[in-house]
Amino acid sequence: MKPEELKIIFLDRDGVINEFPGMGNYVVSLGDFRMIPGSAKAVGLLCRAGFEVHVITNQGCVSRGLLSREGLDKIHQRMRAEIEKEGGDLAGIFYCPHQTSDVCDCKKPRTTLFLKAVAERRVDFSNVYFIGDSEEDILAGKNLGCKTVLVLSGRIPETQTGKLPVQPDFIKQDLWEAAQWITQEKS
Ligand SMILES: [Mg+2]
Ligand SMILES: [Zn+2]
């Protein structure tokens, strides 16, 4: 497939797919994991429109010892199941388990996990969307050279978007609105 034919979307997890757990908090159990209304349906819509959808998420709770990798896998199984109910299928889930003090090479805004997701394929990142709810997401998207979409369903309320040091290319209320917009724009 030619780079321009690949349709790829990257999604952040917390505040985009599932409810933002709050500043400094983490989703460390299935009980903490609640899907944002319409997010599973949104992934279904994107998949049906031919997009390959990957989740790229920072989960420093693993390094902090608050959640095991097995526990995180269980949460991701639940997320996959919720999305599959709406006809979606995640191509990949990539997470950074580290915290800043670990000085790793995979934590967003670094781009290692994104490059891992596309493996060896040649990708025209200017055609790729990254939908996230935080400053580090916008920065990661800019570092990668893709189209950045900030959703207001998580970390950053609408009143603070003007104060961001790096502006996203687009702002949408939530993943459902973003998915409808992307699929209409692309069709
Ligand atoms: Mg987030
Ligand atoms: Zn890392």
Image: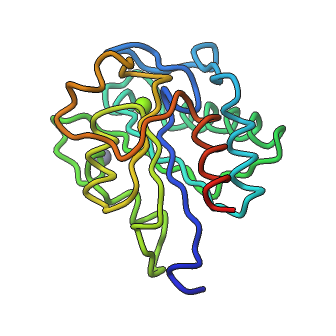
Where 103 sits versus 157, above or below? below
**Left or right: 40, with 14 as reference point:** right
Q: Quadrant of residue 91?
A: bottom right
In depth, the one of 128 and 12 nearer the eye is 128
Query: Where is the N terminus found, in terms of image quarters?
Result: bottom right
**Left or right: 32, with 109 as reference point:** right
In depth, the one of 105 and 151 nearer the eye is 151
Where 153 sits versus 85, above or below? above
In depth, the one of 76 and 65 nearer the eye is 76
Residue 96 appears at what percent x and percent y? 37, 44
Residue drawn at 64 percent across, 33 percent down: 74
**Left or right: 57, with 16 as reference point:** left
Residue drawn at 36 percent across, 25 percent down: 65
Residue drawn at 57 percent across, 74 percent down: 6
Residue 160 appears at what percent x and percent y? 28, 19
Circle count = 0
**Left or right: 106, with 123 as reference point:** left
Residue at the outermost bottom position: 2
Where 137 sits versus 16, above or below? below
Residue 124 appears at what percent x and percent y? 43, 74
Query: Where is the C terminus found, in terms of image quarters?
Result: bottom right
Residue 114 appears at what percent x and percent y? 41, 59
Residue drawn at 50 percent across, 23 percent down: 153
